[in-house]
Image (tube, helix red, strand yellow):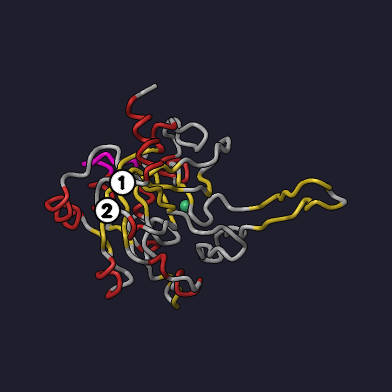
Amino acid sequence: MSETLLRLVEELNAGRLRVVDLTLPLSHATPLIPLPPQWNNSPPFTLRELSRYDARGPAWYWNAFETGEHTGTHFDAPVHWVSGKDLPDSTVDRIPPRKFIGPACVIDVTKEVAANPDFLLTSAHILQWESAHGKVPPGAWVLLRTGWSKRTDPAQYINLKDDGPHTPGWAKECSQFLAGERDVLGVGVETVGTDAGQAAKFDPPFSNHFVMHGSGKFGLASLCNLDQLPPTGAVVIAAPLKIVGGSGSPLRVIAITP
Ligand code: MN
């Protein structure tokens, strides 16, 4: 057996390494991204009981469920966006599983977002973060810590106004920088989607999706507990369901952290 894997289990057992759950609960109450009515919206997550130790199945409990692929804490595959539709191995069942694991770079902009819910991260912010924590390595998950997951009221979480939702995200040039200059696995956010709330008005619309997925990169939406991770040093595991031809899926995202 590999020394490294043995050590990993030992460190976990001893509590020197901790597993942090970056996943929000998935239920009928899970908030959905509100698209303008001319577009198809996602159904809510719905659980349907098949039996519970009763006449329908005397010794077992199980459910069926319906969900959108992009509901709750979920994974965005490159094929999710038109810019990534012709890339090879861009559906969740085809992505090499090695790409589900990477070091986490956590960028804390909680203060900025408290002052401005439409805050956009720029490449200048990344460079500033790198001057303190080192360069974002290739194959990293870059996670935007905004504190947004503390908004437990769905209305506050979506923050929908007359002119659309107001939630933080990425400037287009920042997505280009992370995909092109840093070769990340993808980006993760605490909000309902990986683009800012107002990104329908960006050029191109939803520019983070357009740039990341067009570059074969992934997205993780509706993460939580990013405040339990150090800026660097944690490893994130985010493996979506193996839905044949799927564009994404709800998933359990975990981090292993010192
Ligand atoms: Mn999505």
The amino acid beneath tag 2 is Pro
Residue drawn at x 27%, y 53% as measured from the top left = 230
Residue 123 drawn in magenta: no
* Residue 124 shown left or right of residue 239 in the figure: left
Residue to which mark 1 is pinned: 234
Residue drawn at x 74%, y 49% as measured from the top left = 61
Residue to which mark 2 is pinned: 230
- Indicate the quadrant where residue 125 lies: bottom left
Which of 219/88 is in front? 219
Residue at the top extreme of this rendering: 1
Is label 1 in a helix, a strand or a loop? Answer: strand
- Count of residue discs: 2
Magenta-highlighted residues? 179-185
Circle 2 packing at 10 Å, graded few (<14), some (14-19), many (20+), is some
Residue at the front extreme of this rendering: 14
The amino acid beneath tag 1 is Ala
Query: Do tag 2 and tag 1 residues touch (Cβ < 8 Å)?
Result: yes
Which of 67/54 is in front? 54
Residue drawn at x 26%, y 64% as measured from the top left = 109
